[in-house]
Image (cartoon, helix red, strand yellow):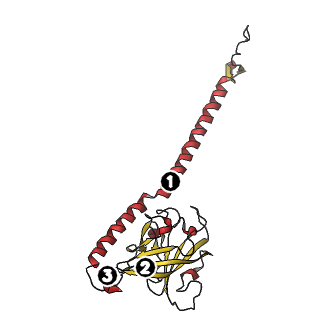
């Protein structure tokens, strides 16, 4: 059946005989197009939901509110510990406990508000809260290598811009006894299996240390996936400001 005036053509139907001579009519026009449209819409909605989920997951990983809360808690712990300790008139021994803070790290080149508490340990559990001191390496101000590892992204993104540091940039580490100012000397990219950056004199395992050093380590290039490469920035102690006059 057609229209007389060039109007739209109605959907066609196909007739076939079923069992017992019954006539079965199958619509092959608009119903098919409608099913196609609904399928495309569902696929598009599924894609949008999946995309939003991935974006939200990535944003949560980068923002990482859990690490921010941990850092605020660590900073409060350090303030209380140091306030009580500053009543003493001698240098205090630093007792390291895995997962607990003992120092504060500042890098002026990253902005005046950039600061992180440093905790003991570098397992995934510790690095999820911020920078961690590599066990077995020296403490701040001691001859040898004070090594600190941290994520580039996630956990507050502490070492996201580590590769931007240049020779002479300052790295400040504060403990209960003093603030140690280091100056950047060098930068190396090594495989994650290369532990020579942790030596008392990085890259020279047989050489005895003659001065306090610091090495900051993170993944490179920046990625949420695994990478076998690490960037290591090493600096040397330039000055010390004691928390108590008697410490000098």
Is residue 119 visible to us here?
yes
Residue 194, percent from left and from top? 60, 79
Quadrant in the picture for the C terminus: bottom left
Q: Is residue 67 left or right of residue 206?
A: left
* Residue at the spot of label 3: 244
**Vertical position of residue 67 compared to residue 140: above or below:** above
* Residue at the spot of label 2: 180
Tag 1 secondary structure: helix
* Residue at the spot of label 1: 59
Residue 140, percent from left and from top? 43, 81
Tag 3 secondary structure: loop
**Closer mark to the observer between disc 1 and disc 3:** 3
Q: Mark 2 and 1 residues: CB-CB less than 8 Å, in contact?
A: no
Q: Which quadrant holds residue 2?
A: top right
**Closer mark to the observer between disc 2 and disc 1:** 2
Label 2 – label 1 distance at C-alpha: 35 Å
Tag 2 secondary structure: strand
For label 2, count other residues whose C-alpha is less than 10 Å away and answer few (under 14), some (14-19) or many (20+).
many
């Amino acid at each position: 059946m057609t229209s007389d005036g060039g109007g739209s053509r109605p959907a066609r139907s196909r007739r076939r005989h079923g069992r017992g001579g019954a006539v079965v009519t199958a619509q092959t026009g608009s119903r098919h197009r409608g099913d196609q449209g609904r399928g495309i819409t569902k696929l598009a909605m599924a894609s949008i939901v999946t995309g939003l989920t991935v974006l939200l997951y990535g944003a949560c990983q980068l923002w990482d509110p859990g690490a921010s809360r941990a850092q605020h808690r660590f900073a409060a712990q350090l303030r209380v510990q140091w306030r009580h300790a500053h009543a003493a008139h001698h240098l205090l021994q630093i007792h390291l406990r895995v997962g607990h803070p003992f120092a504060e790290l500042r890098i002026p080149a990253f902005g005046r508000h950039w600061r992180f508490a440093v905790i003991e340990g570098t397992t995934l559990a510790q690095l999820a809260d911020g920078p961690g001191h590599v066990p077995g390496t020296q403490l701040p101000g001691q001859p040898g290598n004070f090594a600190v590892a941290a994520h580039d992204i996630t956990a507050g993104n502490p070492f996201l811009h580590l590769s931007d540091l240049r020779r002479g940039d300052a790295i400040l580490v504060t403990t209960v006894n003093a603030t140690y100012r280091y100056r950047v000397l060098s930068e190396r990219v090594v495989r994650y299996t290369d532990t020579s950056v942790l030596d008392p004199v990085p890259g020279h395992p047989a050489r005895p240390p003659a001065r306090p050093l610091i090495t900051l380590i993170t993944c490179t290039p920046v990625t949420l996936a695994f990478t076998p490469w690490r960037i290591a920035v090493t600096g040397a102690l330039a000055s010390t400001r004691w928390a108590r006059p008697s410490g000098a």
